[in-house]
Amino acid sequence: MTTTNFKTNTYRQTLWNAAIESGFPTVMWRLPKQNEKHFLTSFLKNPEQLKIEFEDLGPGFAFSPFINPDGNDTYFLKADLHYIFSDVLSENETFEEVIAPSSIDPNFIELLNAKAKTKPFFHTQKGDIESATAKEDFIEEVETAIKDIEDGKFKKVVLSRTKTIAIPNDFEIVGVFDKLCRAYPNAFVSAVSIPELGMVWMGASPETLVSQDAQGLFRTMALAGTQSAFDAEGNLIKPSEALWRQKEIEEHALVSRYIVSCLKKIRVREFEEEGPKTVIAGNLMHLRMDFIVDTVEINFPEMATVMLDLLHPTSAVCGMPKEPARQFILANEKYDREFYSGFLGPVNIQQESHIFVNLRTMKLQNGVATLYAGCGITADSNAEKEWIETEMKLQTLGKFLV
């Protein structure tokens, strides 16, 4: 391992440019409450699509769509090249080469050595741009969902919508990634490029789906219920003073009960619960419950794999019961979620795996940013308030496009 001091924002831009020009799937990420920023490139231009089984995979990065019924459609970006950038000073960071392949594409090396200036950050030749969700359409979908809930078809469904914004001419992936890291220290910040798809996804997700560390400690969370983190005068509300309506309390309880039901299915009863507690995620507050299992103590090393299969998509992005809620989403949402509300994260990097729900995210394609936001609909929902909630969630990334 070598360590060198220099301004890594410039070097990361060079790495990003070289990987994209070479057509390599590439990702940057930063884990919650961490300073280290990761850069990973796979030299397989058409990455594998497979089922994530942590115990059988080497180091890499998982990127899965919302609709993935058998789990076999998850993109896996093998860590052919993996760098870690550790913050020391804002203008001077340390760089560590962690994984380097025995042979590197010579064109990639040539591009790195050229240290070219900022180039287009992704190819713009593929895919049609989704039109933004009209307010009247969203209101109608919510009201239809409430009626179906009252009719007993399901208890909760998560409906979402899109908003499109032209990408500014000075928009630059590495710079925006760093801004997201500074703005949302408690989020999983990421930028994922798969050139064969012709798009880049960026996000700052607050929600862990499954996580298992080097000591075998497994974690997941129930994150549901949303309100502004600021009062009417614009003052930040202390989490300890947050007041929650019955609607949000019940919404969160449904997600928690869903996780417990998954643990019961695999006969895991030795787990810790922390919460529920109010947490701040950017301009929003949520109710959160953490579930923790010592997989070494219960001799269940495959737990992350099993729970990923059971949990996705959770009731926090789909609904309860899962299947009728999913069918309602597919029948009523007027767009394809693609990777929004799917999952993503590092796999077996430094003997740990951390998979997050792809929330607070946007797709960059053909000069347009498509932003996504959803909300949990229950019998107590109000369609106009749900629209306002999605507006608040869209600001998480939207404010970096103006």
Image (cartoon, grey):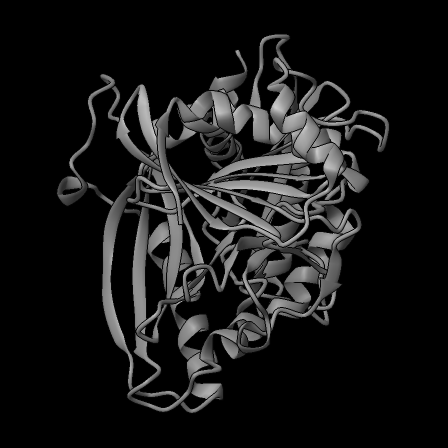
User: Which residue occupies 85% across, 32% down?
Assistant: 126
* Quarter of the rendering containing residue 71: bottom right
User: Which residue occupies 35% across, 82% down?
Assistant: 295
Residue 328 is situated, as x and y percent measured from the top left of the image, at 71, 57
Depth check, front residue: 153 or 255:
255
Q: Is residue 65 visible?
A: yes
Left/right placement of residue 374 relative to residue 250 reads right
Asked if residue 150 is positioned above or below residue 83 in the image, the reply reads below
User: Which residue occupies 35% across, 70% down?
Assistant: 214
Residue 284 is situated, as x and y percent measured from the top left of the image, at 35, 35
| Count of picture labels | 0
Left/right placement of residue 312 relative to residue 352 reads right
User: Which residue occupies 49% across, 82% down?
Assistant: 302
Residue 259 is situated, as x and y percent measured from the top left of the image, at 43, 72
Q: Is residue 378 visible?
A: no
Asked if residue 349 is positioned above or below residue 15 in the image, the reply reads below
Please identify the residue farthest to the top as the structure is shown. Answer: 169
